[in-house]
Structure formats: C-alpha cells, structure tokens
C-alpha cells in the first residue's frame, strides 16, 4: 500500500472522518482553476527572461523591497564575492545553492541582487511562521533589550513559561531545553540510558542498546549520528556509539523480535520521516512499537524535530495516530528561526535524571524562549492547524493534478505541509530549474524526492504559484537525466 493510503487507512485523522482528510485520498485531481488561477496570472507574478549573473540564469521576479546595503541596484558582483569568500575560508561541509539570501518577508526571500524567491524550503522546516513575522520580531527585539543570556545557573521568566506551555500542550510532564535537534536526540539517548540504569538495580544488567529505522535521520553529533541510517553520514566517523540496530521502517515483526530481546534501552522513530523521503508510520506500526516497548521495559522516543509543532496539521504528528511516546524531541520550528531544541519526557523517565546528569550553557536562554512563545501563540491560535491541514490537502491535490501526467513522477505524498514528490530520476535538475524560476525547494531521500516544507502561513495563491512553477520546470528532468 502506498504510504499515504496506509496513513489514511490507519490514522486517527482518517478514522475521525475529517472532511479534509476524506477529501485527500490520493490520487485525486483538482485543477488550479478551482482557485481561480490562470497561467497568465502566474506569468504576471513571475516574468521570465530577465538578465542575471548566475550560471543558471535566474529570471527576475516581481519587484522586491530594495536590499538595504545595495540601494536596490542589481549587483551581480556581490553574489560572486560572497560565494568566492565562502569557498576560500569555510570548511567544505555544505554544497550550497549559488544564491546569497539577504532578506525575507512572509513566504518570500530576496537575494543580494534583488531577486525574489517563493520559499517552499522554509529553512528546512524551520520558518513555520514565515520570515519577519511582526509579532515574532517584536518579541525578539523586546527580549534582546531586556535580557539575552544568564546561563542555566539562574531561573528566567521566558524559559519557565515556555517549559510550562510545552508540558501543558503535550503528553509530557517535564522538559529539557537544548540548542538543536541533534542535541535534543543526544539528550534523549542519555536520558534513556540513565532511565534504564535506574530501573535495573543490583546485579541486573541494564539495557543499553537502541533501535532506529531505515531512512531515518536523527542528527550529526556522535550519538545521534549512530542512530542515523545513511551510511555515507556514518562511516567516515566510525567507531560510533555501539549497540544500534537498524530495522525496516514499518516492519512490525522485526521490531517486536528485536525489542523483546530485553537489551534495548530505547526505540527512536520519526512519525513522519523528513530527510529520509517523506514517509509516514502507520498507526498499526506505532501501536506495535508501543506495546512491545511496554512489555520489554524499553522507552519509545518520537523524533518530531522536523514533523512536530504543526507541520503535520496536528500540533504533534503522533496525535494523528493516537499513540504516545515516553520521550519526544523537538527543534527546528520552535523558536521561529533561532536555535533551540527540546526534550519532552514523562515523569517516569525524568525521575531518573538528577542534578548534573546533563546541561548546556546556552540552551533555553531567555531570547530564544521568548521567541518560541511568539511562535506557539501563532501555531496554537484558533483555526491555524485546521488551515495547515486544508492547505496540505490542496497542495497535494494540485501536485497530483499538475504533475501526475509526468512519466518521471512516481508518487506525490505527504501530510499537512510536508510534501514529497518522488521521481524516477535525480531531482537536482528540477530543483535548479525551480531556483532559476524563483522557487526554493529541497530534495530528500536518495536525491530523487523533491521535498516541500514551506512556512505554515503560506497562502493558497502561493501554493498555486509553487505548483505551477514546479510543473513548468518538469522538462528539466529530461534534460538532466538525458533519457
Ligand atoms: C528528524 C530530525 N531529527 C534531527 C535532526 C537534526 O536537527 P539539527 O540539524 O537541528 O541538529 C533533523 C534535521 O534535519 C531532523 O530532520
């Protein structure tokens, strides 16, 4: 069964008979004309054929606000200078797209040459309330002028308020703040080990092993990396933390067998995989993990770093399945673009952690926490999540309608505003062509999936424009794959 169909068949969302979910059965074709958009409207918003200095000849978009330090002049040299300097002085960890972004507003980004981009990458699922949200900016400016950092030796108002907010709106009883997703998973690894040690006294050997799944991504630091399935990320840095078993995502029998060995401290799973290619668990799989963990005394950890905080159309992606973890990790969108991560845990788990067991100098500082409160205010405002669900359905319907006829498109899938377009060829030529046409999209999986994780505040018109551009750029796949 295709992942989306499996999701619909198994999820609480579907079971609840939501009109939105019911209308999203894939594939179902709905035209742009249903929203009153014509190709000419798209043309007006994105005129092509304007001079550009990058190799890919980007086209000029609608007039942007003038970049502050360039007085609105097109300035090709500025991009070249920045890209050259980066190549000279940076450790080569990022194969960057050759565009220098200078400012952003809502779902639009502007480069130093004044070109406008529609942002369907959202800072890799970070900018969920868009760029430069006025309330968020106000919160950051106010807090920056009040108190930015004091360390975790002292209490601060924003940190305690944010912790309470997160606990109140989740399964969890307690929270621990970090600076990133990988750090949140690192903390979850330590908490799992410590929990097991505390629950096995005397001569008993505490379980220390972990289970993770195919296509998973949990981060780049040594513990989280050990739980990340992609071999090319792992092998250059071996030896990693031992005792990690990778199982097929969704394989219930293999999971049950591995968990009942009694050696497993915790099972890490993303309810919706982002980097891995926009795959979702089924309710059946999560339930099986939950009961196998309960029987064996293993912990169940949901990594919602990418899919959490409204991205799925639910505040937490696991709510769609009605299955709850012992620990959940969060990060990306939480502070609207400032670095933060969080580990949410039940009292049972948290009770095993004592003073000095873990810590961080910067984590949960007043600035990021105050920013995060502004993000939560938006995401939890009435109708916001329903809007994400509806927009997600429209996005997938439009993608299916406009791209479904292409011989290269194998599947359109997703939930809420995380969508994947699986291709039978590498996605890079399409991604480059979209960039040239003023649209930022990402890849996922083995590079054959286009990933869309726009700001959750994206409008219907912007969704239509994005799909129209992707559809027009599809011929690039034939040029790129030379098939
Ligand atoms: C599911 C998941 N977990 C963890 C991480 C790591 O987060 P960070 O890059 O903030 O360390 C990511 C990043 O993409 C992710 O998608």
Image: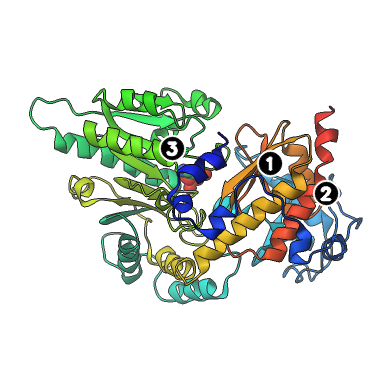
Q: Nearer the viewer, residue 224 or 312?
A: 312
Q: Earlier in the sequence, mark 2 or mark 1?
A: 1
Q: Earlier in the sequence, mark 3 or mark 1?
A: 1
Q: Give the foreground label among 2 and 1.
A: 2
Q: Where residue 221 is drawn, which disc sits there?
A: 3
The answer for how far apart the CA atoms under marks 3 and 2 are is 39 Å
Badge 2 crowding class, 10 Å Cα cut-off, few under 14, some 14 to 19, many 20 or more, is some
Q: Secondary structure at mark 3?
A: loop
Residue 100 image offset from top left, x and y in percent: 71, 54
Mark 2 residue element = helix
Using the rendered image of the protein, determine whether residue 455 is visible from the camera's viewpoint. no
In the image, 410 versus 5, the foreground residue is: 5
Q: Viewed as shown, does residue 383 lie left or right of 450?
A: left
Residue drawn at (40%, 65%) of the image: 369
**Image quadrant in which you'd find residue 421:** top right
Q: Is mark 3 within 8 Å of ligand 1?
A: yes
**Circles 3, 1 touching at the beta carbon (< 8 Å):** no
Quarter occupied by residue 30: bottom right
Quarter of the image containing the N terminus?
top right
- The image quadrant that residue 300 belongs to is top left
Q: Which residue is mark 2?
A: 472
Query: What residue is rendered at 25% in x and 50% in y?
Result: 346
The residue beneath circle 1 is 88
Front: mark 3 or 2: 2
Please name whichever residue, 66 or 260, is drawn nearer the observer in this view of the structure. Answer: 260
Q: Residue at x 46, y 32 (%)?
A: 228
Residue 31, given in percent of the width and then of the height, sits at 76, 56
């Amino acid at each position: 069964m295709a992942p989306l169909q499996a999701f619909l068949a198994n999820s609480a969302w579907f079971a609840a008979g939501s009109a939105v979910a019911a209308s999203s059965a894939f594939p179902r074709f709905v035209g742009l004309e249903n929203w009153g958009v014509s190709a000419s409207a798209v043309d007006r918003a994105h005129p092509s054929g304007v001079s550009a200095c990058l190799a890919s000849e980007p086209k000029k978009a609608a007039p942007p606000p003038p970049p502050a330090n360039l007085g609105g002049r097109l300035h090709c040299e500025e991009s070249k200078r920045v890209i050259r300097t980066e190549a000279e002085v940076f450790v080569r960890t990022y194969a960057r797209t050759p565009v220098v972004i200078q400012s952003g507003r809502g779902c639009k980004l502007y480069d130093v040459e004044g070109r406008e981009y529609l942002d369907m990458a959202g800072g890799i699922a970070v900018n969920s309330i868009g760029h430069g949200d006025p309330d968020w900016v106000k919160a950051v400016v106010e807090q920056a002028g009040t108190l930015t950092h004091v360390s975790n030796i002292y209490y601060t108002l924003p940190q305690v308020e944010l912790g309470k907010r997160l606990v109140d709106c989740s399964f969890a009883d307690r929270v621990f703040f970090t600076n990133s997703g990988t750090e949140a998973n690192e903390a979850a690894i330590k908490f799992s080990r410590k929990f097991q040690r505390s629950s096995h006294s005397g001569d008993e050997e505490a379980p220390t092993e972990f289970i993770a799944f195919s296509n998973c991504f949990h981060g780049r630091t040594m513990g989280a990396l050990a739980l990340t399935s992609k071999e090319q990320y792992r092998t250059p840095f071996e030896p990693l933390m031992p005792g990690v078993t990778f199982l097929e995502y969704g394989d219930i029998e293999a999971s049950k067998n591995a968990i009942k060995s009694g050696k497993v401290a915790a099972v890490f799973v993303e309810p919706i995989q982002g980097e891995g290619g926009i795959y979702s668990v089924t309710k059946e799989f999560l339930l099986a993990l939950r009961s196998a963990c309960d029987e064996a005394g293993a912990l169940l950890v949901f990594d919602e770093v990418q899919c959490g905080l409204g991205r799925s159309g639910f505040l937490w992606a696991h709510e769609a399945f009605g299955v709850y973890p012992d620990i959940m990790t969060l990060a990306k969108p939480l502070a609207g673009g400032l670095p933060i991560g969080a580990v949410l845990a039940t009292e049972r788990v948290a009770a095993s952690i004592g003073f000095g067991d873990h810590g961080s100098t910067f984590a949960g500082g007043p600035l990021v926490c105050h920013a995060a409160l502004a993000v939560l205010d938006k995401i939890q405002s009435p109708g916001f999540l329903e809007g994400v669900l509806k927009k997600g359905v429209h996005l997938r319907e439009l993608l299916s309608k406009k791209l479904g006829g292409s011989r290269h498109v194998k599947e359109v899938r997703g939930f809420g505003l995380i969508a994947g377009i699986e291709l039978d060829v590498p996605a890079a030529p399409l991604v480059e062509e979209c960039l040239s046409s003023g649209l930022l999209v990402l890849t996922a999986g083995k590079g054959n999936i286009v990933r869309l994780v726009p700001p959750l505040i994206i409008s219907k018109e912007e969704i239509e424009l994005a799909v129209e551009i992707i559809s027009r750029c599809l011929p690039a796949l034939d040029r790129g794959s030379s098939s």
